[in-house]
Image (spheres, rainbow, N blue to C red):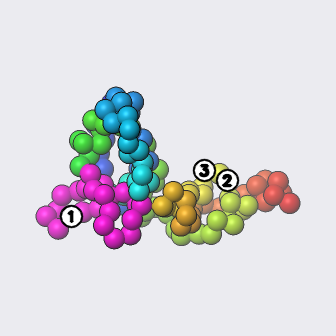
Amino acid sequence: MNDKIDIKEGDVFKFRFNQEYLDKFPLSDPYHCFDGQLVVVTKSDGNLILEDTYWNGNRKKFKLDQLELNGTLTFVCNLNDVDECSESDVRYYNDNDIIDLSYQHGCYKRFVKRRGSKRSKEVMLNFI
């Protein structure tokens, strides 16, 4: 189980179910139509909720305590701290500056780079 985490709008997390949860449903695949990439959004009532990125329309929504009970959340980034970029930018920036936010199990590519990151001479030379 995770330590209590604070979430804010725009936070992106990776989520993996724990073994205890998976053992409850041995004949099903909880990752079917589920990326495990969750974005914090504010509902109309002002509460924060985490939405999976698999579907564009009817996304699966979760409360934080539900996720903490059934798996592990790992912080990736906040969307307010990154800029859109191309997959090809991996040849210019350090690995920790480019974030793969692709969805639908990678079918739809989306990459961002940490705001303020600079191109790496070493990475570019290694690419050549």
Q: Which residue is mark 3?
A: 96
Above-or-below relation of 73 to 110: above
Dot 3 or dot 1: first in sequence order is: 1
**Residue 73 seen in render:** no
Q: Which residue is mark 1?
A: 43
Q: Amino acid at mark 2?
A: Asn
| Residue 117 % position (x, y) | 60, 60
Q: Mark 2 touching mark 3, by CB under 8 A?
A: yes
The residue nearer to you, when weighing 124 against 58, is: 58
- Which quarter of the picture shows residue 11? bottom left
Helix, strand or loop under label 1 = loop
* SS under mark 2: loop
Q: Earlier in the sequence, mark 1 or mark 2?
A: 1
Does the magenta segment cover residue 31? no
Q: Which stretch did the figure color magenta?
A: 41-62
Q: Amino acid at mark 1?
A: Lys
Cα distance in 3D space between marks 3 and 1: 31 Å
The residue at the point 41 percent across, 56 percent down is: 33
Against 88, is 16 above or below? above
Q: Residue at x 30, y 42 (%)?
A: 67
Give the residue at x 20% y 64%.
Answer: 43
Horizontally, residue 19 falls left or right of residue 122, namely left
